[in-house]
Amino acid sequence: MHPTTVPSLILLLTLISTRWFLTGAALQSQHSHGSGGCIAAERAALLSFKKGIKSDLTNRLASWHGRDCCRWRGVRCSNKTGQVLKHDLRNQNPDISSVDGCDDESALFGELGPSLLSLEQLEHMDLSRNCLTEDQGTIPLFLGSMKNLRYLNLSGIPFSGEVPPQLGNLSKLQYLDLGSQYVGNHDLGSQLYSTDITWIKGLPLRMSPVNLSQISDWPHILNSISSLRVIDLSSCLLGSANQSLQHLNLTKLDKLDLSGNSFDHEIASCWFWKVTSLKYLNLRYHRLFGQFHDALENMTSLQVLDLSFNFNQKRLVMEGNFNNLFSLKILDLTDNEMNRAITVLMDRLLPQRAWDILEELHLGFNNLTGTLPNLIGRFTSLTVLDLSNNNLAGIIPPELSNCTCLRTLDLSNNHLSGLVPTGIGAFANLTSLDLSSNNFSGVISEEHFAGLMNLKKLDLSSNSMKLVVGTDWLPLFSLKIAVLGSCQMGPLFPAWLQWQREITKLDISSTRLMDKIPDWFWPTFSHAIYVDISDNQLSGSLPAHLGDMACVELNINLDLSSNLLEGEIPPCFEINISQSIQFLLLSNNSFSGKFPAFLQKCTTLQFLDLAWNNLFGRLPEWIAEMTGLQFLRLSHNAFSGSIPTEITNLQYLQYLDLSSNSLSGFIPRHLSNLTAMTLKGPRLLLSGTAMTLPDGEGNQVAGVTIADQFGQILSIITKGQQLRYGSTLAYFVSIDLSGNSLTGEIPSDITSLDGLINLNLSSNNLRGKIPMKIGTMQSLESLDLSSNDLFGEIPSSLTDLIYLSYLNLSYNHFSGRIPSGRQLDTLNVDNPTLMYIGNAGLCGPPLTRNCSGNNSFINGYHKSSRHELELMSFNLGLILGFVVGLWMVFCSLLFLKTWRTRYYRLVDNLYDGLYVFVVVNWASLTRNASAE
Ligand SMILES: *[C@@H]1O[C@H](CO)[C@@H](O)[C@H](O)[C@H]1NC(C)=O
Ligand SMILES: *[C@@H]1O[C@H](CO)[C@@H](O)[C@H](O)[C@H]1NC(C)=O
Ligand SMILES: *[C@@H]1O[C@H](CO)[C@@H](O)[C@H](O)[C@H]1NC(C)=O
Ligand SMILES: *[C@@H]1O[C@H](CO)[C@@H](O)[C@H](O)[C@H]1NC(C)=O
Ligand SMILES: *[C@@H]1O[C@H](CO)[C@@H](O)[C@H](O)[C@H]1NC(C)=O
Ligand SMILES: *[C@@H]1O[C@H](CO)[C@@H](O)[C@H](O)[C@H]1NC(C)=O
C-alpha cells in the first residue's frame, strides 16, 4: 500500500465535511444578503480568510468590505461568471529582503484556513512572504483540492512539516513556489521535507528549501519525468549528486539549480553532465572538487554557470574542457580559493570565442594574483566585472576602457595602484563603481564621471586619491551610495553633494574637510540611513528636528576638546519614525536636559544608550512602557530621584546600567520580574542577525552583524575594566547601579536572576546583608559590592559561583571568616586581600588576621562545560576590547529589520577565525592562570 493512501482518505473525508459546512453557510449568507458584485459564497469565504488574519499593519485588507468582493484589493473575478480567479496578497514590502514572512512586520499574520476551497475557479494564488503558519505550521492539505490552480506561490511562508503530495493532484498547476526568496540560502534551515517527490510530474518545479534528504534516488525520479524543463532544488538537503543514470531522459531540461546542498564529492561524478540542453546550471554553495567531466565539452548551450562558494580543501580544478562553452554569458566563480594568476585563469578558462559574448564575470574572493591582463579589452559585452578581494597588483590597463557596457565594476580590496583611467567616464550604463581599499593615487576629476549618468553606487574609499571637481560641478548621476572615506576632498565642503538627494549611505569621513556644515546638508540627506562625516574639522549644528532624518546610523566623531553638539537632545523622531526605531545611541555628548520625552512614543525601542551626557531629573515611570527594551544604559549623567519600580516590568531587559548618577532610594523590589535576566545564551535581538545595506542596484551587500556593530560601539565596565564586547553582547546580562546614593538592602529576590553575568552595586549607601542565596546566581562572572554599608558574614554560598572571575567586597562592614574554596581562591591572585580590604571585622585567609572560630572549609575546584560558551564569548569580548580602538559614535540609530547577507561564507569565516583565536587565547589564559 502506498504510504500516502491513508492521509489521502482522511483528507477526503475532511474535505467533504468542510465543504458541506461551507456551502451551507454560504447558502445562508446568499439568502440573507442577496447577490452583490460577487458570489456571496465566495465573499463569505474571503471574509473567513480575512477573519483568520490577526495582523495587517500595511492595511492590505482595508478594502475588504462591502458587497463587491471583486473590487477588493488582490481579488480578481471572471467578467462572465463573477467567480474569483485571482487572490494575490503577496507581501510587497520593497525594503526588506527578508525571506521569512514571519520576520517581517509588513506581512499578514494569521492562519490559512480551508474556507478558500469555496473559490472553485481560483487560478492564481499568491500569498508569498506572509506569516500564515499560525494554525499548525504545515502546508494546508486543502490546497491540493483547489483543482483550477495554475499558479501557486507560497514562498517565504515559513511552513514546516511534510509537503503534501496532494499538491500533485493540481493537474493544471504551471507554477509552484514553496521556496525562499534567495537561492542558496543556508540560513533558512529547511523546515519542509518530503519523502516522495514522484507527485511533481512536469511542474516547473521550485521546491527549495524543502528537506528532501530522505530521497537518495532523486535523480532517478526526476529522470522518469522526461518533460521537465526547470528543476530548482536549491537548499533541499540533498545528500549527493553522484548517482549514475543509465539512460538520460531529461532532454528538455533548460535550468538546473541545485545550489546550497553541500554536495561533497568529485564534480565529475555528478549525474547531469550529459544534459547538453542545459542553459543554466547553478552549483553554488557546495563542496565539490576535482576535475570537470569531459562531457563539459558538449555543453555548448550553457549560458549561466555558477560555481561560486565551493568550499573544499581539495579544490575545483579549473582546467576541464571549457573550450566549447561558447554560449557562456555568466560565469560565477566567487570564493573558490583559486590562488592563481589571473592571466592564466582568463586565458585558459574562457574560450576565445566566448570573450566578446561574456556578460558577467565574477571572480571575487579567490586570492588571484598578478596584474589585470590587457585582454580584458576584448570582453566587449561585459556588464559585470567583479575582481574584488583578490591580490591583484599593478595598474588598471587602459584597455578596460573598451568595456563600455559595464554596469558593475568592482575592483575593491586588491593592491591596485596608479591612476584610474579617465576612460571609465564613458561607461554610460555604469551603476556601481567600487575601487575601495586599493593603492590608487592621483586625482579623480570631473572627466572620470563625464558620462556616468546612471551611477548609483560610488565607493572610492581607502585609497590615496584626491577628488578634485569644480565648486559649480553638476554631476550627471544621482547616487544612492557614496563612500568616499579617506579620499581627499577638502578643505571646502563638497558642493556637488547638494544635488545627490537620493543618497542612502554617505561616508565622507577623513576627507580633510575644514568647513561649516552647509545648511542644505541635513535636508538633502534626510533620507539617508547611514551618514558618516567623522574625522573632519567641521563645525555647525545638528538639525533642529532629527526626526526629519531617516538615519539608521549617523556618525559624527567629536573631537573631545570642542564638542560640536550640545544643548538638549533634539526630538529625534517624530511619530512616523518613532514607531519603528529600535536602536538609539546618543552616548558621549554634552546633552543636557531631562530624560527625552519623545522616547515615550518609541515603543519599539530595544537598545537605548544615553550614557556620558549631562542629563538630569527623575527617570520617568513610563520608561516601563518601552516594553521591548533589552539594553538600557543611562550611566554617567546626573539623574536623580529613585529608580522607578516599574522598571521591573521590562521583561526583555538584559542589560541595565544606571551607574554614576545621583539616584537615591531603594533598589526596586520584584527584580525577579526581569525574566530576560534568568535566561542564558544569546538573546533574540542580537544573535547573529546580519545587517546589510542595499547597494546601487538594490542588491544586498554584505554587512556586519548587528551584535558586532553595537558590541563594538558599546563599552561596558565590568571586572573593574572598560571592555568592548563584540558579538558577545548578545550574551551579556548585567545590572550596574554603582556610583549612586541608593539606600536600603539588596533585594533578596535578585538571586533569582541566575542569568546575570555582571552585578555591580558598588559605591552606594546600601545596608544589610548579602542575600544568603547569592550562590544560586550561577552565571555571575563579576560581582562588585564595594563601598557600601553592608554588614554581616559573607555567605559561604559565594563559593558556588564557579565562573566568578572578579569579586570586590571592599570597604563595607563585613565580619566573620572569609569563605574559601573553589573559584574564590583563584581570584585576584596578585593581591587577593584587595577584594576584602576595608572590612574591619573580616578574618581568615587571604587576610592575615586569624579567626578565633572554626568555620567549615570547602575545597575543590571543578569546572563544568555548561558555561564554556559564555566564558569563551566573554573573553572574545575582552580580546576585541583590546583590539578595537576607541571610536566614538555620536548618534546612531538603527531600524532593525531582518536583512540577510549573500555572503554567509564571509561571516562564517569571520566567526570561525574569531572562534579559533579565542579558543587559543582562552586556552593560553587558563594555562597562565593555572601556572600561577
Ligand atoms: C474584464 O473586465 C476588465 C475591466 O472591465 C478588463 O480590463 C479585462 O480585460 C476583462 N477581462 C476579460 C478576460 O475579459
Ligand atoms: C523516461 O521518461 C519516460 C516518460 O516520461 C518514462 O516513461 C520512462 O520510464 C523514463 N525512463 C527512465 C529511465 O526513467
Ligand atoms: C560529445 O558529443 C559527441 C557527439 O555527440 C560525442 O561523440 C562525444 O562522446 C561527447 N563527448 C563526451 C565527453 O561525452
Ligand atoms: C594566495 O596565493 C598565494 C600564491 O599565489 C599563496 O602563497 C598564499 O598562501 C595564498 N593565500 C591564501 C590565503 O590562500
Ligand atoms: C576593443 O574592442 C574591439 C571590438 O569592439 C576590438 O576589436 C579591439 O581589439 C578591442 N581593443 C582592445 C585593446 O582590446
Ligand atoms: C546601455 O543599456 C541600454 C539598455 O539596456 C542598451 O541599449 C545600451 O546599448 C547600453 N549601452 C552600452 C554602451 O552598453
Image (spheres, rainbow, N blue to C red):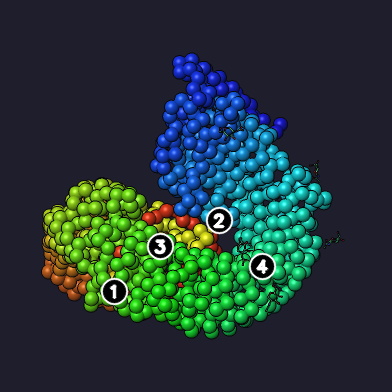
* Residue closer to the observer: 693 or 337: 693
Can you give x and y, in whole percent of width and height, for residue 264 in the image? 66, 60
Distance CA(mark 4)–CA(mark 3): 32 Å
* Three-letter code, disc 3: Arg
Please give the name of the residue rendered at 23% of the width and 77% of the height, measured from the top-left corner.
561
Distance CA(mark 2)–CA(mark 1): 47 Å
Question: Which of the 4 image quadrants contains residue 284?
Answer: bottom right
Labels 3 and 1: the sequence-earlier one: 3
* Residue closer to the observer: 555 or 8: 555
Q: Residue 186, labelled with which disc? A: 2
Quickly name the residue at label 3: 501
* Three-letter code, disc 1: Lys
Residue 59 left/right relative to 409: left
Quickly name the residue at label 1: 516
Please give the name of the residue rendered at 68% of the width and 35% of the height, measured from the top-left corner.
172
Can you give x and y, in whole percent of width and height, for residue 392 in the image? 58, 79
Question: Which of the 4 image quadrants contains residue 865?
Answer: bottom left
* Residue closer to the observer: 126 or 334: 126
The kind of secondary structure element at disc 3 is: loop
Q: Is residue 281 above or below residue 71?
A: below
CB-based contact (under 8 Å), mark 3 and mark 1: no
* Comparing labels 2 and 1, the label whose residue is closer to the camera: 1
* Residue closer to the observer: 885 or 119: 119
Quickly name the residue at label 4: 381
